[in-house]
Image (cartoon, rainbow, N blue to C red):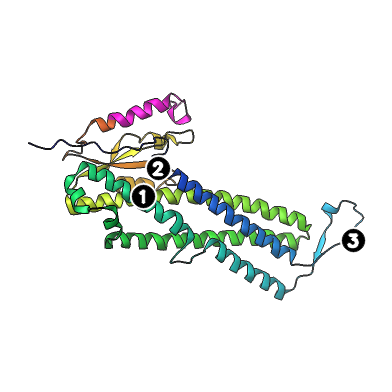
Amino acid sequence: MATKARSPILPSNPKDPTGIDKLERGAILDFSRRLRKVRRAYIAALNRIPAEPIATNRKETENKRYAYRLDQYLLQSIMAGLDADLAAILLEGGEDHLWFFDAYVSVAAVRGTAQAFANLGQQSEAYRAGRGSVNQILASEPYRRRMAIIQARVFEDMEGFTATIKSAMSRVLTEGIGRGLNPLTIARNLTDQAGIEEGRARRIARSEVPMALRRARWDEAADAAEVYGLRTMELHLSALGRTTRATHAARHGKLFTRESVRDWYAVDGNSINCRCSQSEVMVDADGKPLVPSIIERANKTKEVMKERDYDWSKPKK
């Protein structure tokens, strides 16, 4: 007698389908802390430059022009010091142990692998028996190879982010000096620019951490298909919250091939600030789920969330 198919696992918290919102928030706080250090480093560099107000008839100290006694040697020394500060703060750990990768991205990948292991193991006895444990997967050559690729890419992205911050903050500093602005004004401008960079950092955390989890799940499902012959598709699960994009909500409760999911995330900024997840669902030769009720369960969640009348739930005009 054929064994009855067991249901895939859906997220326990539909508002956080990836299950790593706390990890993302931790990364955001870490970025914020580091960017405060960057801001302080630039303000400290500004304070190293002797400045004197230029005599005017104005009484308003704030509007006085300042003369900065800055020669090429001092400027080069200051900029070299800032380069070192930024590297120490934003690229801490270097390529082998970058803080963002070790503390957040790799952790998300491990959780994604564990989620895929639990989900596929529930649906397939052959997979569960063959894989043994999550630790066996993490110690495997294919997993280590995948993580090495991600690690290199994350470091490269962080190098680019660091270079962008250096360019923006240095421009604010040198332009302020060149215009003879009050040091207090330059310090405020540096603080404002750091705030802009913090927004970019938040986007990185909200994008890269969940993408690491999703990729880990896709990769494990792909490997399971190759090794154990599991036929699976990806069930899209949206957070269906206030900020959910209509195009993301529209995919909720639908099955897609892994390649089409990868392609979708690669275009139109779909990976940016995305809180969606996918769950591996075993299907038959026609692509129909072995447990049809899983689609009904996913859609029931969507119907409940529609009652909150978020923008994504409203019909297009």
Q: Residue at x 32, y 32 (%)?
A: 298
User: Is residue 297 found inside the magenta-colored segment of the image?
Assistant: yes
- Secondary element under disc 3, as helix, strand or loop, is loop
Give residue 108's position: percent from left, percent from top: 40, 51
Q: Which portion, as a residue range, is magenta? A: 296-317
Q: Are marks 2 and 1 in contact (CB under 8 Å)?
A: yes
- Secondary element under disc 1, as helix, strand or loop, is helix
Say if 144 sits above or below 257 in the image: below
Give residue 33's position: percent from left, percent from top: 58, 54
Q: Residue at x 82, y 52 (%)?
A: 62
Q: Which residue is mark 1?
A: 111
Q: Amino acid at mark 1?
A: Arg
Question: Position of 181 compared to 233: left or right?
Answer: right
**Quadrant occupied by the N terminus:** top left
Query: Gap in Å between the C-alphas at discs 2 and 1?
Result: 9 Å
Given this view, does label 2 or label 3 mark the residue nearer the observer? Answer: 2
Q: Which mark is residue 19?
A: 2
Say few, some or many: other residues with alpha carbon within 10 Å of mark 2 (under 14 / 14 to 19 / 20 or more): many
Give residue 99's position: percent from left, percent from top: 48, 60
User: Is residue 158 found inside the magenta-colored segment of the image?
Assistant: no
Residue closer to the observer: 205 or 37 = 37
Label located before the other in sequence (2 or 3): 2
Residue closer to the observer: 4 or 211 = 4
Q: Which residue is mark 3?
A: 55
Q: Is residue 180 visible?
A: yes
Q: Amino acid at mark 2?
A: Gly
Label located before the other in sequence (2 or 1): 2
Give residue 6's position: percent from left, percent from top: 21, 37
Q: Which mark is residue 262?
A: none
